[in-house]
Image: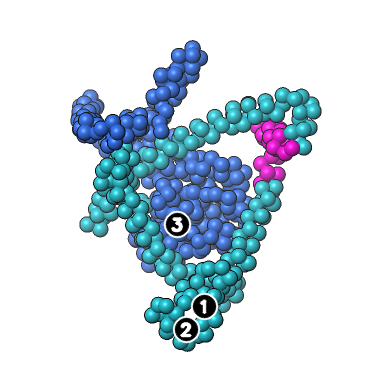
């Protein structure tokens, strides 16, 4: 254990020295009138280094076989149950990877979860429907679902229209999906990604159609709607953790633990800030976190 | 190679974007690189639109040919796709080579109906069909909010009752007549709601969720950059 720790620390220190050296050279080359390096963003840079080191350290530990505990997230655990229910009822599963384009990280998180869900669906032989709003998401989604069917050796059951383009307009998309829900009555609806004003329209219609509903989004303003209308809701970071959680791959879980460690550092930083503010000496501390 | 190349591209593009955030774009090549990369995203996005049209036509045309449930709606969808697209790409004058051929067949007086300008077919369909339908869908949200609120605010437990009372107070405070009513009881009540409920409990919880989500986002980005997370490409 000590050996593992020592080699990881040496690697991180080397990497930090290399990156710091690179930036030091850049800073020395800059002039006051026309700077190359954005010194006003140095706090973000330091945070990035700490965060990356923590994630890499835990990932490395996971790779070396260290057992990592990850708390149970009921919403993610319910995905398999929901697909099982759909299989028993002989009804389809609806998966919506949000309504943003593929350049949005929430959509990528949604597509990652889609890969996991598609594997379960393919193994059970349950019909899956994935309506999308952007053609780029269509291409990525088709690739993800096809690969999932291939991996469970059910490629013959794969339908290229499982992932289908519906409409580019937000409410045209919503109207189509809502109509489909009321006609086909899916047994499980899974919403994972970026949602906007249509979140409640979708979730309420799914509720009226009698489906078990699991939602996940990182947008706090849409969370109350999903909480009110869905059976399970993944809030914020849980959306990004879902894919790792479903896979149970140590490498991916390592990233989650690294994230938790940084969260602990943030909590400590907030507490220090509160104490300093209470004694009215926190001005300098506040300036560290002020970034343009 | 099929597995490695996308990871290498993702790594290089991602690292370039991260580094360019810390440098002055005007003094380094990274600024131009970042701009070019974003333009490439738009160009690739334009090409994938063909995939989208192909998908929508194939799925709906199949349903029409099989006369499945609601096939006439699917037919309307296919017709709508072409009704919006074709007139908008037709030439609006006889200046181009395509325009000359087109207006040798059709009268030039039809030119105003094509393209995407004012009073064109596209413009008319957008303003008088598409927009009202979108607005109607958005307007129905009020009814959905009412039904969801009814379910969420049912006082079945102590927590739900607390939520119901808080929600009623906030709703009252948000409308002028409610605010006047609350001020009538005690002039400080609206300020207390703002200070304790909205800027206190509500904001602190929202910030907690935002910090967690931002860390999750950064962690996922890092996993993608390093090729640990490849499920978005159908791998892993």
**Among the two numbered marks 1 and 2 on one chain, the one whose residue lies closer to the N terminus:** 2
- Secondary element type, mark 3: helix
Chain letter of the blue region: A
**Residue at image point 29% right, 36% down:** A34
- Element class at badge 1: helix
Q: Is residue A31 visible?
A: yes
Per the rendered image, the range of residues in magenta is B147-176
Look at the magenta stretch and give its main secondary structure: helix
The chain identifier of the residue carrying mark 2 reads B
Q: Residue placed farthest to the top in the image?
A: A279
**Measured from the top left, where is residue A117 in percent x and y?**
44, 53
Q: What residue would you read off at disc 1?
A: B111
Classify residue A44 as left or right of residue B107: left
Q: In the picture, which quadrant includes the N terminus of chain A?
A: top left
Q: Which dot marks residue B71?
A: none
Q: Element under label 2?
A: helix
Q: Nearer the viewer, mark 3 or mark 1?
A: 1
Q: How far apart are labels 1 and 2 at the CA level?
A: 8 Å
Circle nearer the viewer, 3 or 2: 2
Instruction: Report x, y in % for residue B207.
Output: 51, 33
Q: Colour of chain B?
A: cyan
Q: Are marks 3 and 1 on the same chain?
A: no
A104 to B99, vertically: above or below: above
Name the mark on residue B103.
2
Mark 2 neighbour density, 10 Å: few (under 14) some (14–19) many (20 or more):
some
On screen, residue A222 above or below B115? above
Are the two marked residues, 1 and 2, in contact with CB atoms closer than 8 angstroms? yes
Magenta span includes A5: no
User: Is residue A11 at least partly visible in the picture?
Assistant: no
Q: Which residue is mark 3?
A: A121
Labels 1 and 2 positioned on one and the same chain: yes
Question: How was the colour assigned to the protein in this rendering?
Answer: by chain
């Amino acid at each position: 254990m000590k050996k593992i720790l020592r080699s990881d620390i040496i690697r991180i220190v080397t990497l930090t020295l290399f990156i710091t050296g690179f930036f030091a050279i850049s800073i020395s080359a800059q002039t006051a009138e026309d700077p190359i390096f954005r010194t006003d963003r140095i706090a973000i840079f330091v945070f990035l280094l700490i965060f990356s080191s923590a994630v890499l350290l835990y990932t490395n530990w996971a790779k070396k076989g260290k057992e990592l505990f990850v708390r149970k997230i009921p919403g993610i655990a319910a995905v398999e149950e929901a697909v099982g229910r759909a299989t028993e009822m002989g009804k389809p599963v609806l998966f919506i990877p949000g309504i943003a384009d593929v350049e949005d990280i929430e959509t990528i998180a949604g597509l990652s979860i889609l890969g996991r869900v598609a594997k379960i669906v393919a193994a059970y032989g349950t019909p899956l429907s994935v309506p999308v709003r952007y053609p780029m998401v269509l291409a990525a989604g088709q690739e993800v679902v096809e690969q999932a069917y291939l991996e469970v050796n059910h490629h013959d059951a794969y339908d290229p229209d499982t992932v289908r383009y519906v409409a580019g307009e937000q409410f045209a998309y919503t109207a189509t999906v809502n109509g489909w829900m009321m006609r086909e009555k899916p047994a499980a609806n899974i919403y994972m990604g970026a949602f906007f004003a249509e979140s409640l329209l979708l979730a309420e219609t799914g509720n009226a159609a009698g489906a078990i509903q699991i939602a996940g989004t990182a947008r706090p303003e849409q969370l109350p709607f999903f909480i009110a209308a869905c059976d399970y809701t993944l809030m914020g970071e849980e959306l990004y953790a879902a894919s790792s959680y479903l896979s149970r791959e140590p490498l991916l879980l390592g990233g989650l633990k690294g994230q938790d460690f940084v969260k602990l550092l943030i909590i400590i930083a907030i507490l220090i800030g509160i104490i300093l503010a209470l004694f009215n000496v926190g001005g300098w501390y506040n300036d560290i976190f002020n970034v343009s | 190679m099929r597995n490695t190349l996308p990871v290498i591209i993702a790594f290089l593009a991602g690292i370039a974007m991260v580094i360019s955030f810390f440098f002055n774009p005007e003094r380094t090549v990274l600024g131009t690189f970042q701009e070019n990369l974003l333009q490439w995203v738009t160009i690739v996005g334009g090409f994938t639109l063909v995939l989208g049209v192909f998908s929508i036509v194939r799925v709906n045309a199949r349903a029409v040919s099989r006369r499945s449930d609601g096939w006439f709606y699917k037919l309307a969808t296919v017709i709508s796709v072409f009704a919006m697209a074709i007139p908008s790409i037709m030439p609006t004058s006889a200046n181009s080579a395509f325009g000359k051929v087109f207006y040798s067949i059709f009268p030039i007086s039809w030119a105003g109906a094509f393209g995407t300008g004012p009073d064109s077919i596209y413009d008319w369909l957008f303003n008088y069909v598409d927009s009202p339908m979108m607005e109607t869908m958005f307007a129905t949200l009020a009814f959905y909010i009412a039904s969801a609120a009814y379910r969420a605010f049912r006082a079945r437990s102590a927590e739900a009752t607390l939520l119901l009372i808080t929600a009623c107070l906030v709703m009252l405070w948000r409308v002028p007549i409610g605010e006047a009513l609350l001020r009538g009881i005690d002039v400080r009540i609206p300020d207390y709601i703002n200070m304790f409920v909205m800027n206190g409990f509500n904001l602190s919880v929202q910030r907690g969720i935002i910090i967690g989500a931002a860390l999750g986002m950064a962690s996922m980005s890092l996993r993608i950059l390093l090729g640990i997370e490849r499920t978005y490409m159908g791998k892993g």
